[in-house]
Image (tube, helix red, strand yellow):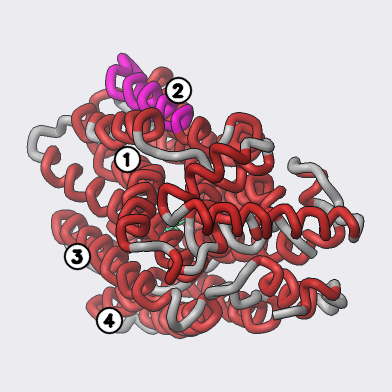
Amino acid sequence: MQGFSSAPVREGPLAGVPPAGLRKIWTWGILIALGGFLFGFDTGVISGALLFVRTDFGLNSFQQGTVVSVLVLGAMAGALTSGRIADRFGRRRALEIEGLVFLVGTVVAVFAPGYGTLLAGRLILGLAVGAASATVPIYLSELAPKDIRGRLLTLNQLMITVGILVAYLVNLAFSGSGDWRAMIAVGSLPALLIVVAAVLILPESGVWLLQRGRRGECRELIASVTDTATADRLIERYDRRTAEEAERGEPHGTGPRALAARRVRPALAVGLVLAALQQFAGINTIIYYAPTIIERTGLTASNAIAYSIAIGVINLLMTIVAIRAIDRAGRRRLMVASLAVMTVTMVLLGLSFVAGWPSELSLVFMVVYIAGYAAGLGPVFWTMIGEIFPARVHAAGSSASTAVNWASNFAVSLAFLPIASAIGQGETFWIFAAISLLGLLFVVRYVPETKGREYERIDADLQHRFGRRPTEGAAVR
Ligand code: BGC
């Protein structure tokens, strides 16, 4: 099986990319990952802003809930549509459009005269957040030489965590004045930067250019980070693989239909299960509800805000650990260790509530849980959805997985407090522990290692794990 992921730029051996080329790729990567920053910022800022919106607009608790969750609904829709946009207009244009939508959403929310307009602004922001969260992983993966692919893709999660932390700090900075409009307005700066970068600095993805038959531009792109001989060699290899693929009668097409092809189903299963697992393991009950949970442990509200900043810092620091480890230890090891830590800490967190242990202990378990998540499940999910799909369905696969991630996020955030009230908070954490454990078993059995591998090997591993025979070409190392 040959996928478009075997396209040139992605395959360039690191040794073949000189330091100047690598610097360029990292700069592009950081600019693209600003989409992740906005993801984190816009989901994080509302927890602080809401405290003041609530009194300003006189919102009841249902209305407050809608201001938070309408973004997640918008994100689901944004993620679903992003695949088509990224395939039709290219990855660069898609990011540009998403940056513009971010700007529009921010302006609408910042100047909202009342609840209805604020809701509309948050919905528009959600569309941008969701679409960007699906575009960023594929864009990064299509520009990355395989040896640094993990690190470059992990930038996405790093920027998500930076965005969350900056949002908490912005909340803190404006909490004295209660200026919630200023809190939300801060997001316009990175949004503007994304638009400027997409228009002036970022290149189009080489994979997309080749799919569109724009070989000259692709050659120029590869040559700009390596040299023309490497560009020619990689494009030739791409042609050879495309021809082999056609000979084998592999399905063509780019959209959701091609995603359902038998050959792609194992990748789709891994993408969708990891997407759901990332949310159903309970991460956002801690991220979104940390202050609420902490207040229940008997600490004051101001301690709770300081504590959420501490959570943000741990989340960020451990993501940096993951970036350093992902191309060395590999994705599977990080994920298994991460899920093991998450399972154990959720069991203990549940116990601490049920058995009435000192609240300091609950806090320690929450911090260790976040650390475990940030070092594995958090970043590895976003990395892998850029790696497991054949390139022709990169955009569609990322789009579907991301949409499931947002839908799961929505379901968990909605159900958490009612379930906790019904069966108890500690018992609810045990449900998350059980899900993490099942997730661990799934990873051990079905998730392929992608570290440093060409697409063919990833696919062969996937087919093998799902009990299918790899095609001859795919079996070759
Ligand atoms: C998840 C978000 C979560 C964040 C926490 C991301 O990977 O998709 O839902 O809030 O990690 O760092």
219 in relation to 364, above or below: above
Pointer 2: residues within 10 angstroms few (<14), some, or many (20+)?
Answer: some
Between residue 377 and residue 260, name the one nearer to us: 260
SS assignment at label 1: helix
Label 2 within 8 A of ligand 1 by Cβ: no
Q: Earlier in the sequence, mark 1 or mark 2?
A: 1
* Residue 35 place in picture, x, y as percent: 40, 43
Q: Earlier in the sequence, mark 4 or mark 1?
A: 1
For disc 2, the marked residue is 120
Does label 2 or label 4 sit earlier along the sequence?
2
- Dot 2 lies on which element? helix
Which residue, given by chain and number where applicable, does mark 1 sit on? 46
Looking at the image, is mark 2 or mark 4 nearer the viewer?
A: 2
Q: Nearer the viewer, mark 4 or mark 1?
A: 1
Q: Name the residue located 60 percent from the left edge and 77 percent from the top edge.
A: 449
The residue sitting at 69% across, 80% down in the picture is 477
- Which residue range is magenta in the image? 96-115
Q: Is residue 455 left or right of residue 424?
A: right
